[in-house]
Amino acid sequence: MGATALRNGPSPVPAPIDSIVEVREISKTYGNVEALRGIDLDFPRGKLTSLLGPSGCGKTTLLKIIAGLIPADGGTVAINGKHITAPGPERAFVFQDFALMPWATVMRNVAFGLELRGTNKAEREAIARRYIAEVGLAGFEDKYPHQLSGGMRQRVGLARALSVDADVLLLDEPFSAVDEQNRRKFQEDLIRLRTNQNKTFIFVTHSIEEAVYISDRIVLLSPRPGRVSQIIEPEIDRSGDPERIHRDRHYLDTVEEIWQGLKQYVE
Amino acid sequence: MTLFGYRVPMMTSLLVWCVVWEIVGRLDLVFLLPPFSDVLVAAVSLVQTPSWQTATVTTLRAFATGMALSIVIGVPLGILMGRVKIADDLLGMWVNIFSSAPLSAIVPVLMILFGFGEKTIVAAVFLFAIWIIVLDTRAGVRHISPSLIEMARSYGASRPALYSKIILWAALPEILAGIRLGLIRGVKGVVIGQLLVAIVGYGALFETFSRNFRMAEFWALTIMLFAFALLIAELIERAEAKVEYYAGARQ
């Protein structure tokens, strides 16, 4: 295994020293389908944790429960030690299908979270402008979503999440509707963002490579019912050229290892 | 439209039919159809009469009031049905029945309820126009992407903000389509209402013209109504095109 730390089995993982999100005994059932059973997880502050698993493992459901968008049937979620059941300003969500308002400009879309909080127009536009530049969309403030490519639209979604200054960013397969070249660029940007912004990221993906490439911590979920099967902490040096990571030996080993573990769920 | 390789404006086809009408009229085959030129002359003199002017004001006022009522009530009702299942179950059947029922049959009942005056005409316009507005609004609300609503909720939208900033805008293309169809039905409502009441506005004029076989004036009035219906439909369609442009990014 070398540099990869592995913890096996579904037993609860001992809490890290500073965890911002604590998930305890979360369960969720849709009709007679058990989506999640007894999920116990801690998300360390300032780290990027991926929820990885085959489709049907409940990873998006878990993310939306943490977001407060879906009620859990049992168990609790605490953010900064406080139990939550609804969305709150300390969390921001990035959607798989971008969820932009087609009738609003990039500026208004990015500033929308602040608009809902009642921030005055001048102030929220100044903040939005900064994050539009941060995600590389300076000059596109007055464009409408349909005038942008898929990759650029998701950058708008990301800027909107950043501009509300939440502690936790929840990303639901943010790159799955973005073409391959843009996805690569985006992943590199995310690594850079994570170092600049002192935020906690929870990232849902079904791509092993993507999870290993960007994550400090990978939570592997197994399907039917969704449970935590493994937690992996790839120890990959992400300073320097992001292109090099794809050829890093630890990176390749970890991808292979996860694939061996997930193989059994693929027919 | 192209003809023998030349581009000709769309209105040309209309001109052809006007010429056909003129010829048939001049042949004097049926007295119901005077030459088109006579109709035009009648139209010019008609608009100068005080009776036409009063009738037009009455008709427009009844139409505008009826339409305003059906939009103000129809759009919220459609949104309610699109969002709340119980409301949809309760009202869905009735809205569907009324939107396809032969409403002309109900107009006499309206006369009993509202008397032989403008109120009956307003009620007729309302009754003709509202259902399609409700149905289209409901369809528009149903088609809003769930993630757009989740987005608003996750960024802390209050219920009023969710409706005024997201739901109304996201359903706007369908709402406008409903209003356009409602306007056309409303024109039907105002005409049928006035014809049945027969002593108000255009209904009274139609009654006079047809009873006295003043066909040129009769046709002039009919054409004016058609033109009016087409004109407002066209105006709404312009607004719709603009909204569609923004809504193009919808999945």
Image (spheres, coloured by chain):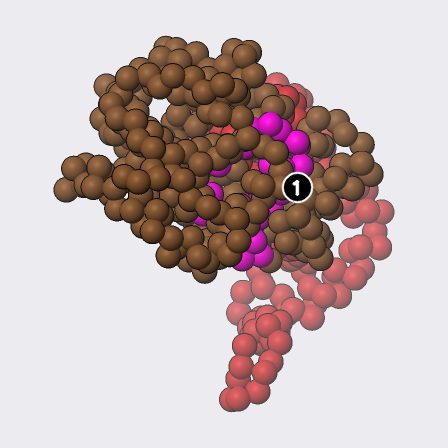
Chain colours: A brown, B red
Q: Return the residue nearer the eye: A91 or A197.
A: A197
Locate residue B183: give its quadrant.
top right
Which residue occupies 58% across, 41% down? A195
Q: Position of residue A154 (x, y in %)?
A: 54, 47
Q: Position of residue A148 (x, y in %)?
A: 58, 56
**Quadrant occupied by the C terminus of chain A:** top left
Which residue occupies 59% across, 72% down? B10
Q: Return the residue nearer the eye: B66 or B138.
A: B138
Relative to B90, B248 lies left or right: right
**Quadrant occupied by the N terminus of chain A:** top left
Q: Secondary structure at mark 1?
A: helix
Q: Vertical placement of B6 versus A243: above or below?
A: below
Q: Position of residue B85 (x, y in %)?
A: 44, 21
Locate residue B128: give its quadrant.
top right
Locate residue A207: give its quadrant.
top left
Judge whether residue B121 is colored magenta.
no
Q: Chain of mark 1?
A: A
Q: Position of residue B70 (x, y in %)?
A: 63, 31
Visible in this render: residue A216?
A: yes
Residue annotated with mark 1: A110
Judge whether residue A158 is colored magenta.
yes
User: Badge 1, how many Cα within 10 Å: few under 14, some, many 20+?
Assistant: many
Q: Which residues are magenta?
A: A148-175
Q: Return the residue nearer the eye: A184 or A158.
A: A184
Visible in this render: residue B195?
A: no
Relative to A159, A204 lies left or right: left
Which residue occupies 49% across, 18% down? A17
